[in-house]
Image (spheres, rainbow, N blue to C red):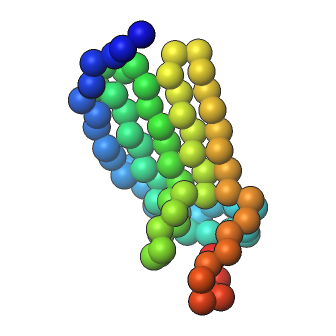
């Protein structure tokens, strides 16, 4: 079933310290939600560059998916 595009709202409500599988990290919580309430996703993003998500939660109706980073390899050998 095709759906029409919906307007989304992006917010960054807070910065927190979060326990991840890679240790305690400073993260930004980013929320992307459809204005009509049909779906939303929350992302916990690394606060420092390179920015990438440690965890993502996606909700649409009864569907609730969670994705979590369990390991990271960066070119140059820096700390993830």
Q: Could you tell me which residue is drawn at 50 percent across and 22 percent down? A: 60
- Left or right, residue 17 beside residue 30: right
Residue 21 appears in which quarter of the rendering? bottom right
Which x, y percent locates residue 31? 41, 43
Q: Residue at x 42, y 10 (%)?
A: 1
Which residue extends farthest top? 1
In this picture, is 32 found above or below 17? above
Q: Residue 17 appears in which quarter of the rendering?
A: bottom right
Residue 69 vertical placement versus 3 (above, below): below
Q: Position of residue 20 (x, y in %)?
A: 70, 60
Image height of 9 relative to 75, above or below = above
Query: x%, y% of residue 74?
Result: 61, 78
Task: Please state which of residues 42 and 52 is positioned toward the viewer in this rendering.
Answer: 52
Write down the quadrant of residue 23 in the picture: bottom right
Q: Quadrant of the C terminus?
A: bottom right
The residue under the point 37% across, 20% down is 37
Task: Name the residue at the left extreme.
Answer: 7
Q: Position of residue 49 (x, y in %)?
A: 45, 76
Q: Is residue 47 left or right of residue 71?
A: left
């Amino acid at each position: 079933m095709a759906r029409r595009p919906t307007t989304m709202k992006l917010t960054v409500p807070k910065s927190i310290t979060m326990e991840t599988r890679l240790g305690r990290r400073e993260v930004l919580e980013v929320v992307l939600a459809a204005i009509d309430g049909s779906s939303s996703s929350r992302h916990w993003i690394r606060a420092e560059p390179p920015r990438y998500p440690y965890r993502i939660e996606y909700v649409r109706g009864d569907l609730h998916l969670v994705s979590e980073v369990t390991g990271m390899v960066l070119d140059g050998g820096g700390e993830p």
